[in-house]
Image (spheres, coloured by chain):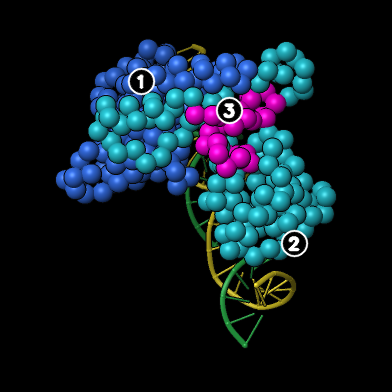
Chain colours: A cyan, B blue, C green, D yellow
DNA sequence: ATTTTTGCAAATCATTTGCATATAT
DNA sequence: ATATATGCAAATGATTTGCAAAAAT
C-alpha cells in the first residue's frame, strides 16, 4: 500500500509541479489494489469525473516509473501493467487470479545476480524479477478474481 | 547459439508442418546475434527476399515462444524483443550495449523463488528474471554497439 | 513573466485478424 | 483429400505527439 501523499510528494521532491490532475492521479493510483493498466485508470477517471485524461495518465505514469514510485510490469499474457511500490522493494510477486501484488524482499537475489555476473563476466546494471502465482487468499478460494 | 535445424525440429516435433517460410524463419532466427524484434526480422526478410511476411513472423514467433525455443524479452526501454534459447536456460542476461545475450544457469534462483514463496505464502507458478548489463567484450571496448 | 502542464485529436507503432489461396501431409 | 499455413490488407489497440490554451511557480 502506498498512499497518495507519498506519490504526490515524489512529484514535488523531483521538482515537478503540483497540479489538480496529478493530485487526482495520485489518489487514483493509491487506491489501486493490485496491478493496473493505463487504460483502467482512464476508465476510472472518467467514471468518477476526475478530469485526468489519457495523455496525462501516460505522461504521469512515465514520470512515476522513472521515480520508482510505480513499477512497470509485463504480465505473462503480454499485457502491460503497473503497480505502486514501496520505494524499498524492487520486485513484485503478482497473483495471477486476483491481480494483487506484494513487494518482494531480497531473499538472496542480489547474491544470485552477483554470482551470475561473476560466472558470465557481465557487469550487471539492472535486473528484473517478476514472480507470478496464487496469493494465499486465492489459494483458499477466499477471494473473487 | 541455436541452430536452424533445432528450431525447425521444434516445429516438427510439436506437429507443425515444415514450410518454406518456416525454414527461412528458422535460419533467420538462428542467425540473430543478440536479441531481435519481430520488426527486425521483417526488415531482414525483405532485404534478403526470404519471402517471410509480417503475419507469418508474428505467428511463428508466437509458436516458438510457446515451445520455449525463443524467449520474449521486455527491455528496460519498454520495447519487446526475443532471443533464441537453449531449451535448458530459462533466463537471459542481455548486454545493453551490443544487445547480445547469454543463457543464465540457475545459480540459486530456484531457491530464491522458493524462499520468496514460503515468506509470502504465494504458490509461485512462474518467474522471469531478466538481467541487463555490459558483456565482457563491451566492457573492454572490443566491440561496436 | 516565464516555464511547465494539460487537453484534445490526430498520428504512430506494434500486433492481430479475416478470408481467399496455396501448400504440406 | 483434408487440414494447416500463408499473404494481403485492413482492423485493432496501445501509446505518443504537436500545438494552443491553462495553470503553477
Q: Quadrant of residue B106?
A: top left
Chain letter for mark 2: A
Cα separation between marks 1 and 2: 48 Å
Residue B1's x, y, as percent?
25, 27
Say how many tags the image has. 3
Tag 1's secondary structure? loop
**Mark 2, residue position:** A20
Q: Is residue A105 visible?
A: yes
Name above or below for residue B109 compared with residue A29: above
Badge 2: residue crowd in 10 Å (few <14, some 14–19, many ≥20): few
Q: Which of the marked residues, 3 or 2, is nearer the chain's N terminus?
A: 2
Q: Quadrant of residue B3?
A: top left
| Quadrant where the C terminus of chain A is found in the figure | top right
Q: Is residue B57 left or right of residue B116?
A: left
Nearer to us: label 1 or label 2: 1
Magenta part of the chain: A80-106
Chain letter for mark 3: A
Chain letter for mark 1: B
Residue toward you, A104 or A83:
A104
Q: Is residue D14 left or right of residue A128?
A: right
Label placed on residue B107: 1
**Mark 3, residue position:** A93
Tag 3's secondary structure? strand
Residue A12's x, y, as percent?
63, 60
Tag 2's secondary structure? helix
Residue toward you, B39 or A3:
A3
Amino acid at each position: 500500500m502506498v498512499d497518495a501523499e507519498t506519490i504526490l510528494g515524489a512529484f514535488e521532491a523531483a521538482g515537478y509541479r503540483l497540479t489538480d490532475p496529478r493530485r487526482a492521479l495520485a489518489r487514483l493510483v493509491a487506491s489501486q489494489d493490485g496491478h493496473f493498466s493505463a487504460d483502467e485508470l482512464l476508465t476510472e477517471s472518467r467514471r468518477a469525473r476526475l478530469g485526468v485524461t489519457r495523455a496525462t495518465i501516460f505522461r504521469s505514469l512515465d514520470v512515476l516509473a522513472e521515480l520508482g514510485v510505480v513499477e512497470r510490469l509485463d504480465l505473462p499474457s503480454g499485457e502491460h501493467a503497473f503497480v505502486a511500490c514501496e520505494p524499498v522493494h524492487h520486485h513484485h510477486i503478482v497473483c495471477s487470479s486476483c491481480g494483487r501484488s506484494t513487494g518482494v524482499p531480497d531473499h538472496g537475489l542480489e547474491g544470485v545476480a552477483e554470482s551470475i555476473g561473476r560466472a558470465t563476466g557481465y557487469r550487471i546494471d539492472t535486473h528484473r524479477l517478476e514472480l507470478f502465482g496464487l496469493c494465499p487468499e486465492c489459494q483458499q478460494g477466499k477471494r473473487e478474481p
